[in-house]
Amino acid sequence: MFWGLANGGGLACASAVGVLGYSVFFLQALKTVPAGKAAMVVALNPVLTMLFAALLFRERVNAVMCLGLGLAVTGALYALSGGALGELVSSSSGVGEWLLLGCAACWVAYTLIGRIVLTRVDALTTTTATALIGAALLLMASIALEGSSAWTGLAKAPAVAWYSVVALALGATALAYAWYLKGVQELGAGAAAAYMSLVPLFGMLLSSVWLGEPITNSLLGGGATAIFGMLLMNIGRMRLERASHSAAA
């Protein structure tokens, strides 16, 4: 049964980390961190997912994928720290940077939990269930932390704010989560997460065009390194797939 104990527990855990945890960490971080820099943290998601998928689910990796993983992590952290990697572990690190690292942890957990849930529940149903459960969790967190008075401001919100909310709900949440989980179901956790390497590139470009945020040297250098690492990971994965097909033939 869909609402069996195992399925229900898995969906609840996925909702807690992938919807509640990720949303709270990310949106709170955006209060203090530029959007382009925030998008860079997504480069950590595929490498951490690949690492834990190999450890927990025995997904195969090779030397090329490990090299790409190292480059991607280094590039993402370099951009995240503004070119000063030591600041991430020093007292001068901002709260926003640590919140972004929390985002990466939540997304990795969501992907790995989703991989288990998707063995019993289809991608669209999983997305719908996690969105509904996550919405309930977010509502409870909002009332508990901000109080009901925070909701009165919705009536005075400008039209552009509502347009942004609709775009987040339909594009960045409903479609994105459904397509991503379908990718996890078809390709596996590590392979699907590798496509997240495109997010930092689009994040930096669109934040510069739409929000007028500057593209710094640390963002460019770190972003290029992270994306190159992602490419190496994909090359390594394709080599593994070719080797598997040749062995099967």
Image (cartoon, rainbow, N blue to C red):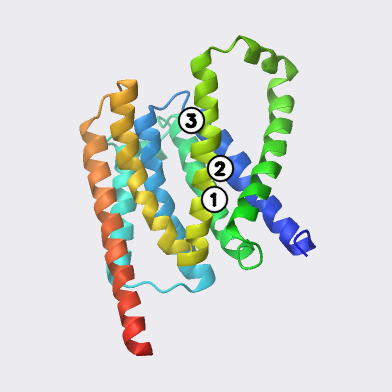
Whether residue 85 is visible to the viewer of this picture, yes or no, is no
Residue 215, by quadrant, is: top left
Per the image, label 3 sits on a secondary structure element best described as helix
Is 52 left, or right, of 133 in this rendering?
A: left
Q: Position of residue 188 (x, y in %)?
A: 48, 66
Quick one: label 3, few (<14), some, or many (20+) residues within 10 Å? many
Please provide percent x and percent y for residue 136: 72, 37
Mark 3 and mark 2: Cα distance apart in space: 22 Å
Q: List the residue tagged with mark 1.
A: 178
For the N terminus, which image quadrant? bottom right
Please say whether residue 193 is visible from this viewpoint.
Answer: yes
Task: State whether residue 248 is above or below residue 147.
Answer: below
Q: Amino acid at mark 3?
A: Ala
**Amino acid at the residue labelled 1:** Ala
The local secondary structure at tag 2 comes to: helix
Residue positioned 33% across, 76% down in the render: 240
Residue identifier under label 2: 174
Q: Answer with left or right where residue 235 lies relative to residue 180.
A: left
Q: CA distance from mark 2 to mark 1?
A: 6 Å
> Relative to 48, is 202 above or below?
above
Where disc 1 sits, the SS reads helix
> How many angstroms separate mark 3 from mark 1 (CA)?
24 Å
The residue depicted at 33 percent of the width and 47 percent of the height is: 198
Q: Residue furthest top?
A: 156
Q: Are marks 2 and 1 in contact (CB under 8 Å)?
A: yes
Nearer-the-camera pick, 115 or 41: 115
Q: Amino acid at mark 2?
A: Ala
Question: Which of the 4 image quarters holds residue 235?
Answer: bottom left
Quickly name the residue at label 3: 29
